Amino acid sequence: MTKAMPRELTRQQYLDLYYYMRLNRTVEETMVKLFRQNKIVGGLYSSLGQEAISVGSCYALDKKDWIAPMIRNIGALLVKGVPPRDIFMQHMAKYDSPTKGRDGTSHFGDLDNLHIVSPISMLGDLIPVMAGVAIGGRYLGQKIVTMTWIGDGGSSTGVFHEGLNFAATQKAPFVLILENNLWAYSTPVRRQVPLENLADRARAYGIDSYIVDGNNVVAVYNTAREAVERARAGEGPILIEAKTFRRLGHAQHDPAEYVPKEMRAYWEARDPIALYEKFLTAEKLLDAAGKKEIDERLDTLLTAEREFAENSPMPPPEFAEGGIYCTGDDCHKIRAKWERAIAEVTPPKSSVKPVWTVPGFGSGKGSGGAGAPIHFGDTPAPAIMEKAGENGRRAKPAKTTGKNATKKAMKAAAGASRKARR
Ligand SMILES: Cc1ncc(C[n+]2csc(CCOP(=O)(O)OP(=O)(O)O)c2C)c(N)n1
Ligand SMILES: [Mg+2]
């Protein structure tokens, strides 16, 4: 486990973090009103009290990086650049929404411009998906980092472990934010994980982790930024446990009466926005006039966005079957969007060095492609040969002894490994 180094932010960065947390909260407050007016067609989830996590972690990413937000990460969508109107229309299933009214919650993404992978309900499934996106980006030489979020409950799914193990083995440039808000529906974290710190799960995959106060936006940003920089530098995936509390029920239907009053009172006194306002005021980064300006900016923006969303029509009924059955026109035209020629990114011509860290696995340290010498790392050559044989052609055990045997084994392994890479 590592502790992030403190870093100085610019005045603009400090103020951006504040603006996005306020935007996150106001967008969700607006949606609660819409829900009570029966204008939201699906379930409505809340990230009240968890805004510092979505905002601080997503703000640590660069524009080219990729995210896959979960239900309590509307703040991340906003930081990435999704306009509030899209979030409103999506929840109202309007025609102009990103999914054209086909979904009533936040199941939407933007692969082309904002680099957002659409979430799915199955908890944990985004972990291997985002590990895959990270590896894909590395393969294309894009130097991207990917990020997704998971809850304390979601961290007990099988796919969490499969995904993180896969990401670790592949050294994927991937950062996973584990939002430990102490509850999964009505199950307290103590009754589903026998660990004090969920960050300890990282040790099972040999990756580094951080624990951060999820109600302190600057701490979340600093930690996420350090993790993102390390992942981008090739250190592999990193797990960050952000400790926080789910202030409302699981969704609008849940009054969460099972939460002890003292627990709620403790966390309500640690509201991330109120804490940050105190910090900004003490640091002379925000005064009453500055706060009023932001209040007005949010009010103007969200009134316009809400009105646009409310005025968008519902999708016409005859559109319901569109995009479901293959007509042979559009769906068959889908092609991978390679930014570089396929030949250029495929070994042996690839200019991107593969990063394989398991000795004997893949093409070896700093391989120059087929024909380049294979580096065996710490593992003796015959063991490598067996491994390579499993992946490709079954290599015969070398019968000769001494220097010649090693040479023969290396030759066989190189042949099998080349084949496996094809
Ligand atoms: C694999 C899977 N199992 C169960 C569910 C149903 N489910 C949806 S949210 C939820 C609780 C999640 O708790 P947690 O991961 O702590 O996230 P939080 O709601 O606290 O943000 C459950 C059990 C699901 N969506 N996916
Ligand atoms: Mg939870």
Image (cartoon, helix red, strand yellow):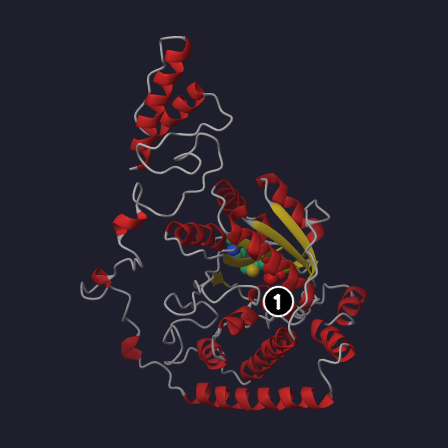
Viewer can see residue 337? yes
State the residue position of label 1: 56
Front position in the image: 400 or 325: 400
Q: Residue at x 75, y 73 (%)?
A: 275
The image shows residue 60, relative to residue 309, as above or below, that is: above
Image coords of residue 123 (percent x, y): 52, 55
Amino acid type at image mark 1: Gly
The image shows residue 175, relative to residue 365, as above or below, that is: below
Rendering quadrant holding ligand 1? bottom right
Q: Residue at x 60, y 73 (%)?
A: 252
Front position in the image: 299 or 399: 399
Badge 1 density bin: few <14, some 14–19, many ≥20, Cα 10 Å: many
The image shows residue 240, relative to residue 418, as above or below, that is: below
Answer with left or right where residue 189 lies relative to residue 308. Answer: right
Answer with left or right where residue 128 lies relative to residue 199. Answer: left
Answer with left or right where residue 405 lies relative to residue 34. Answer: left
The image quarter containing residue 389 is: top left
The image shows residue 310, relative to residue 222, as above or below, that is: below
